[in-house]
Image (cartoon, grey):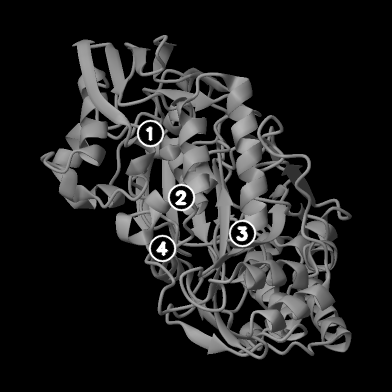
Amino acid sequence: MLFSVGRLIDAGLVRASLRAQPALECGDPSPPWRGRPGNPFPLAFSPQAGHSVRRSAALACAAFILLLAACGQRAATPADAIVVGQVAEPRSLDPHVATATNDFRILAHVYEGLVRFEPGTLDLGPSLAREWSVGEDGRRYTFKLRDDVVFHDGSAFDAEAVRFNFGRMLDGDHPFADTGPFPMAFLFSMVESIETPDPHTVVFKLNEPYAPFLSNLAYPTGYMVSPAQVRAEGSRFGRDPSGTGPWRFREWARQRWVQLERFEAHRDAASATGVNRLIFRPLPDENSRLTELLAGNIDLLVEAPPDLVGYLREHGDFAVTETEGSHLWFLILNTREPPFDDVRVRRAVNYAVDKEAITRDLLQDTASVAHGVISRVFDWASNPDVRPYPHDPEKARRLIEEAGHAGATVRLYATESGSGMLEPLPMASALQADLARVGLNVRIEVFEWNTFLARVNAGLEGRAHMAQMAWITHDPDTLPSLALSSTALPEAGGFNSGYFENKRLDELLAAARRTTDFGERGRLYRDIDRLVHEEAPFLFVAAWRQNAVHSRALRGMRLEPSFLLNLTEVEKVR
């Protein structure tokens, strides 16, 4: 295990981390856990961190594991519960407020949408809607709703509930518009009107054809919340939620857990597996996640660190589940200010980073080198001619010198942990070292996950030159539209935190969303893939193969290409 403790040593973050952990009592089913301080602190990573340090770290890790093994029998989680270790505390349990996959993994159990991603695919199937049809002009979507659905609070799900959900997000004059903010509401900004001709029929009229509309409905922002509970709780709905899913909210203890319990009135309740509770524990510190897994205090660890995945693949006490998905880990480049307002410097940093070494050595083949903005999972839309930027430090140095920025100091925002963020601190260290070799001095500032998101989403102007980011997408339109379109600038409420603006990209995105011809849509996204690669508004680094490590007591465990989690059919045996 090369990096578990070593990544903290390399990053200069060792603050007697093992000594700071509460004493581990073998057999204790719920050991104490203490979160790390949320205040940001600057780091100056050492590019010279060498193999001798990492070997020492590996030895420390090995000793730590042997210490755990010496404790004897591991603790047992409750027989009727699956305990999940997550990388961060959720921001909100309101699906219209949340933006992170970390939160979505919980929400996917509590809520449902009109449609869903079919298990094991990104294909769309029925959920709260039994069926649907699309008008010939691509602007009219008619949904026939199920008539056997109730919310967890006992209120009825019907067409008026659907109207309430979208009105709350889209209509600034809605009585409950102030229960937001709703940062992903623009996924449905094309909705012109909603008709409810009867209690079980909903008709959406769009202001223009919008090809991603159905896949957006399957995304958590399209989940249905209980109007009755929103009326009762107001802006506190995200702390006491109600949906229609197979699990209902039970308790949220800050910094400790979110607990869900089976919803017996759900239409699929008869297929229950004997697992009656789901417990999601926030464990931002990587060593804490390792400790809790090996001690038996969690059953399932999502987004397991690469070294742990590599180690446990070879040991029989745990199972490793992996699957491909649409993921991109990259750096947002601030294109509004020097040096990244110059495309030569943007291309230079892409040439400078040895991404093969990062994916092979640091991520231990749990990810592949990223090629561009559209995932290969969308094989009909990604451009096969777009290849990853090769590692060419000489070319990078020459481009930086030509642009007049040799020796410049740039600020990089990084996070301690977060959904889809892979190994953010070691990645920051590796990037810093590679950029130093081509003439850029990188100053790294690290933040707790939710603080990090707030700072980055507000835009990098006057704050930072680069920021780590990971996106997990459900449609080829998602990332370029939400993070690169000129209509998605931070001042407009979007996620284009690097302020990239390109008229041709905007035109291609608009055309791809409007066309109803699948082949033409694919051609347009391939053009988008090529344009973004050439303009390099991101430093493209890695595409993650989603993984989870879990106890062999869990049967039927499967990961979804959507990166959402579905534990409803998972059994737990002893």
Which of discs 4 and 3 lies nearer the camera? The answer is 4
Mark 3 vs mark 2, CA separation in Å: 44 Å
Most foreground residue, 122 or 553: 122
> Which residue is depicted at the point 51% across and 58% down?
281
Which of discs 1 and 2 lies nearer the camera? The answer is 2
SS assignment at label 1: loop
Mark 1 vs mark 2, CA separation in Å: 25 Å
Q: Quadrant of residue 70 in the image?
A: bottom right
Q: Determine which of the numbered discs, if any, sits on residue 223 in the image.
A: 1
How crowded pointer 3 is (Cα within 10 Å; few <14, some 14-19, many 20+) is rated as: many
Disc 3: which residue:
297
Q: Determine which of the numbered discs, if any, sits on residue 485 in the image.
A: 2
Say which label, 1 or 3, has the lower sequence index: 1
What is the three-letter code of the residue carrying label 4? Asn
Q: Is residue 269 visible?
A: yes
- Asked if the residue under mark 2 is in contact with the one under mark 1, i.e. CB atoms within 8 Å, the reply is no
Say which label, 1 or 2, has the lower sequence index: 1
Q: Determine which of the numbered discs, if any, sits on residue 542 in the image.
A: none
Mark 4 vs mark 1, CA separation in Å: 23 Å
Most foreground residue, 465 or 43: 465
Q: Is residue 449 above or below residue 48?
A: above
- Please tell me how many numbered marks the rendered image carries: 4
Most foreground residue, 272 or 492: 492
Say which label, 4 or 2, has the lower sequence index: 4
What is the three-letter code of the residue carrying label 3? Asn
Q: Is residue 560 visible?
A: no
